[in-house]
Image (cartoon, rainbow, N blue to C red):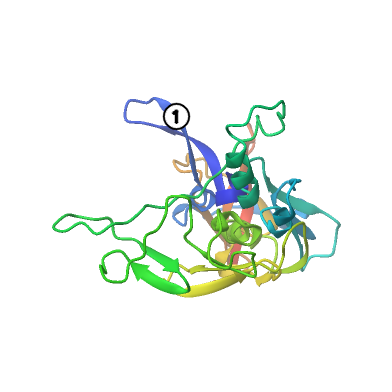
Amino acid sequence: MEALFGSVWSVEKDESGNEYVIFKSRSLLFSQNVVKKIENYRELTISVNEKLLYSGIQIGFDKQEYNSINGRDEHHFSSNLKTNNNIRDSILKLLSPYRADSYGFEFATHDRFKENTDRNSDSDIWMISTIPYYTHITGGATTHRRRVYNNKVYDNRSNSNTPPFLTYGIDFRANNSINDKYIFNAKFSPRFLIEANREYISSFAKSLEFTSHQGNSKISNTTLNAENELIELKENEGTELNKEDRLFSNSEITFETSDVDRIKDYNGLIVIEANGNIYTGYILDATENYGKERAITYQLALKDINPN
């Protein structure tokens, strides 16, 4: 889920106190709400978290082998990109344990009724992108959705121009593929996975430069951005990353304080004013120092430094 959707698991409680596990966007674990302001402190230090100085990322899926020439058109494998960091040689791997390869899925459906001893894919778990099949219903309520079809934006509220969207996930236009109109699981391509993890990747890099891809790197997909504008994402292109998008930075701040009031939300921001600046960050660690005047030592993942 992390590689595909930028999601992580979290343990939640219902009204009765029962615990359950859900998957949520990683960004929801980093609230923008300020939960504590530190007014007294000492021994404040700032350091770089070297573990976050990735020189590159590998993102996508494990490569599959097919007994078909069309398999060379597959692009749901992994891409390699380098960051702007060159201090240490370290690669972040965001590889999904699931399969989403479009040709592999189609080949598997062709073999589902065959009697053979091939067990290669018996333990595979597939992620399939599906969308509703829209039809016009007179006098009834419908769910309003916007989709891309042949490089045009359609709204199912417009009865005259709504194409039939099929349930096997054709909600993107593919370019430079054998079939330049339809493709399974387009939204699970490595380039889209970068977008799903953009906030996290922005925390340690300013840019990504494409270096290699295990499949057809010439493919691009046309889809909608958050503003419902048509955009084209190319598998063989990198991207610039904005500071405003990042969850946190690759720096940490440590200090001691006598403020022992408990924090109710550990996903929120801690604020401290020091040295003419305002520091904000998320708790990585809080250690109680029994018997000392400065009773707690905080270690924060630094988000921002702004002038006071």
Q: Nearer the viewer, residue 182 or 185?
A: 182
Quadrant of residue 147 within the rendered picture: bottom left
Residue 220's x, y, as percent?
Answer: 62, 68
Q: Give above or below for 16 relative to 36.
A: above
**Residue 294 in which image quadrant:** top right
- What percent of the width, then of the height, locates residue 200? 62, 56
> Label 1 is placed on what type of residue?
Tyr
* Count of numbered marks: 1
* Residue 277 seen in render: no
Residue 153, compared with residue 289, is above or below; it is below
Residue furthest left as drawn: 139
Query: What residue is disc 1 on?
Result: 20
Whether 211 is drawn above or below 24: the answer is below
Which residue is drawn at the image coordinates 70% and 28% (left, top)? 119
Residue at the image point whose x is 64% and y is 66% from the top: 177
Residue 5: x %, y % from top left: 55, 50
Q: Which residue: 56% across, 58% down?
A: 183
Whether residue 159 appears in this view of the structure is yes
Q: Is residue 191 left or right of residue 152?
A: right
- Front residue of 83/165: it is 165
Image quarter of the N terminus: top right
Secondary structure, mark 1, is: strand
Mark 1 closeness class: few <14, some 14–19, many ≥20 residues within 10 Å: few
Q: In which quadrant will I find the C terminus?
A: bottom right
- Left of 148 or right of it: where is 239? right
Q: What percent of the width, then of the height, locates residue 244?
A: 56, 69
Viewer-proximal residue, 23 or 307?
23
